């Protein structure tokens, strides 16, 4: 089983021969691929990917990505393989390029996103076991891994390390237009360059949603806890407006 597939399109009268690569499913390390094979889940190891990629050396390559991500080390290996490929690499993000998959996407000479796609970057995560010294070391290792990931984003976007670090801290989700604006992508698929994009840019992160919700809930608590001797008419009007704002009525 594998999460990638090379497709060789034969030449026609109007189009030259082309090679497409579809990356789907989890991105896993060489040592873990057998687990996915055991359960029949789509996955593969970077070594097998590199071996097959070598068969198309010198040819332009279109890479479609639809993946939630996986191992940062496997993602880094595939990123390097694509950067070393002799031939133009065009990355097209189908619907999602998240976590380690977003690192792979940065290998494209040109990165295009579907108008319905999202790109997500966040801090590396792991599990740990041991005493306080072991766990502090794990945190230090994660800092180093984060720096290595940031290099790929900085090389593509031109943003500062501090900006990228802050975006990873916030677990940042980018729409296609927002990704182009930030430099993570070069263009949006299927859009006429002569027209203004019809899709609004947005920069979504989970912490912003949580903070906004907490603020509204706290306002509600204060409002409903107001002393009874306050003006009831004004208080009821405020309650009604807040319930509408919270989509509770």
Image (spheres, helix red, strand yellow):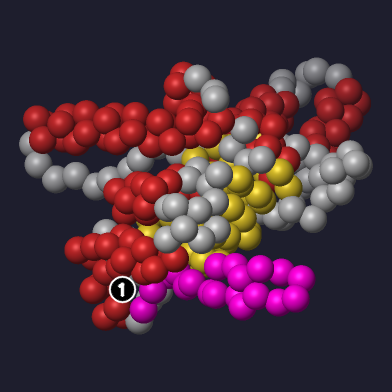
Q: Kindly identify the residue that appears in the image at 79 percent across and 34 percent down.
A: 242
In the structure shown, which secondary structural element does the residue marked by tag 1 occupy? helix
> 201 left or right of 91?
right
Q: Please name the residue shown 25% across and 73% down the image.
A: 35
> Nearest the camera: 223 or 177?
177
Looking at the image, can residue 100 be seen? no
Residue in view at x 40 percent, y 31 percent: 151
Figure check: 238 above or below 29: above
Residue 187 location, x and y as percent? 71, 43
Say few, some or many: other residues with alpha carbon within 10 Å of mark 1 (under 14 / 14 to 19 / 20 or more).
Answer: some
Left/right of residue 192 with respect to residue 175 in the rendered view: right
Q: Quadrant of the N terminus?
A: bottom left
Tell me the residue at 48%/31% (across/down). Answer: 155
Q: Quadrant of residue 40?
A: bottom left
Q: 30 or 111, which lies in front? A: 111
Q: Which residue range is magenta in the image?
A: 1-19
Q: Is residue 58 magenta?
A: no
**Front one among 110 and 15:** 15
Residue marked by disc 1: 36
Question: Between 31 and 232, which is closer to the camera in this rendering?
Answer: 31
Question: In the figure, residue 33 lies in which quadrant?
Answer: bottom left
Q: Position of residue 245 (x, y in %)?
A: 80, 37
């Amino acid at each position: 089983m594998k999460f990638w597939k090379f497709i060789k399109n034969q030449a026609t009268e109007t189009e030259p021969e082309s090679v497409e690569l579809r990356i789907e499913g989890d991105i896993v390390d060489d040592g873990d691929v057998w687990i996915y094979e055991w359960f029949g889940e789509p996955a593969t190891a970077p070594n097998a990917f590199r071996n097959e990629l070598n068969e198309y050396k010198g040819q332009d390559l279109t890479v479609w990505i639809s993946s939630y991500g996986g191992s940062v080390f496997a993602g880094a290996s595939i990123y390097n393989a694509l950067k070393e490929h002799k031939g133009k690499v065009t990355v097209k993000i189908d619907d999602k390029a998240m976590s380690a998959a977003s690192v792979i996407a940065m290998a494209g000479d040109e990165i295009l996103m579907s108008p319905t796609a999202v790109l997500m970057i966040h801090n590396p995560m792991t599990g740990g076991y041991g005493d306080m010294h072991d766990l502090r070391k794990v945190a230090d290792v994660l800092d180093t891994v984060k720096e290595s990931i940031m290099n790929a984003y900085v090389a593509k976007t031109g943003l500062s390390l501090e900006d990228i670090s802050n975006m990873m801290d916030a677990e940042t989700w980018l729409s296609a237009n927002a990704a182009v604006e930030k430099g993570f992508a070069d263009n949006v698929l299927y859009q006429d360059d002569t027209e203004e994009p019809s899709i609004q840019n947005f920069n979504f992160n989970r912490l912003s949603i949580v903070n906004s919700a907490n603020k509204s809930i706290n306002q509600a608590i204060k409002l409903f806890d107001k002393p009874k001797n306050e003006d009831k008419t004004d208080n009821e009007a405020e309650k009604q407006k807040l319930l509408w704002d919270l989509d509770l009525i």
